[in-house]
Amino acid sequence: MSFKLGLVGLCTSHPANWVPIIRQLTAEHYVDAEVHAAWDSGQTRPAGYAKEFCREHGIPLATERLEDMVDEVDGVIIHTADWGRHVAQARGFVQAGKSVLIDKPLAGNLRDARQLIEWAAAGHRLTGGSSLRFAREVRDWLARPPEERGEVQTAFTGCGTDEFNYGIHGYALLSAVMGCGVRSVQYLGTSGQRLVKVKWSDGRIGFLCVGPAAPLPFHLTAVTNRTVIQMTIDSSHLYRDLLEGCLPYLCGINNAPPFPMNHLLEPELTALAARQSWL
């Protein structure tokens, strides 16, 4: 029987883009998932938008209240643009033992981050975050033999648009190439965008350029003990990269999450620390 997914929050372009990918992954037998229900808060969309969305995308059920979805699905994807509502919207599903994937940013304050860590530690199935954490360009490059690519010592990443809602992708890209273990964060100044220095517990250093700007491409420069690699990430496959990484765990095919929650949250926590530094 297909894993029944619900969509929570339809205020971004993500739900409409993700539904066909989920169906394609099911057609390819990568997972067996059905997008069964959708709900929208009405925070940015007009009244009745969930019903319109479900008709357009062939989704069986549009619920008027979020709590009405809990018994109808096996898990949910929380797409709500207001990250301050993510934990509150996840709570009923977590308490009912349902799987939850939270779109980026996972959380925007320490209280919510700690709640996600607590839920994960208690055995609840939670995942999500920025698609840049799963970018295939980085994944494929890191899969090369260490004697060929070397060990990453320093990296520089960034993107445009804003500091957190979109800027979180820059932090996630840095985490993707450098791994976990951030020790400290320091704001260095600005030359249009904010420049941030991130230090790992093993002494490695990364830099980010984030903040208000044109929608610049996701970019990465990594220096290893053997070479220098530069990448511009192709955004056309990023949603699929994330869903390939998260859906098997969300749907119960894999029991190990793509990242433990404390590791998954490192981009958000690094971004919060950077904000404290420049304030």
Image: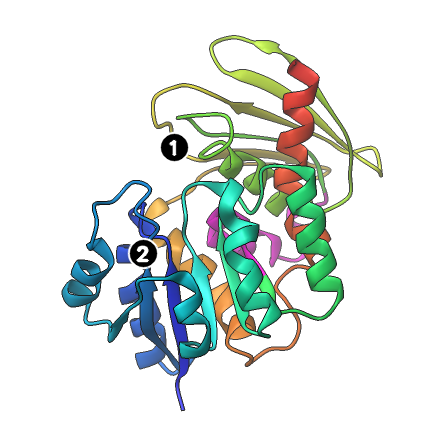
* Total numbered labels placed on residues in the image: 2
Q: Is the residue 20 above or below the residue 87 in the image?
A: below
Mark 1 neighbour class, 10 Å CA radius: few under 14, some 14 to 19, many 20 or more: few
Residue 15's disc is 2
Front in this rendered view, residue 275 or 89: 89
* Residue bearing the label numbered 1: 217
Tell me, yes or no, whether the highlighted magenta stretch contains residue 143: yes
Residue sitting at x 25%, y 44%: 45
Name the spot of residue 255 as percent of width and height, x first.
Answer: 64, 77
Predominant SS of the magenta segment: helix
Quarter of the image where the C terminus is located: top right
Quarter of the image where the N terminus is located: bottom left
Name the spot of residue 240 as percent of width and height, x first.
Answer: 39, 60
Tell me if I can see residue 86 in this picture.
yes
Residue sitting at x 60%, y 38%: 174
Front in this rendered view, residue 65 or 122: 65
* 160 horizontally vs 274: left or right: left
* 23 horizontally vs 184: left or right: left
Name the spot of residue 161 as percent of width and height, x first.
Answer: 39, 26
Mark 2 neighbour class, 10 Å CA radius: few under 14, some 14 to 19, many 20 or more: many
Q: Is the residue 215 above or below the residue 14 in the image?
A: above
Q: Which residues are magenta?
A: 127-151
Name the spot of residue 212 as percent of width and height, x first.
Answer: 42, 19
Tell me if I can see residue 30 in this picture.
no
Residue placed furthest toward the right: 202
Residue 190 placement: quadrant = top right
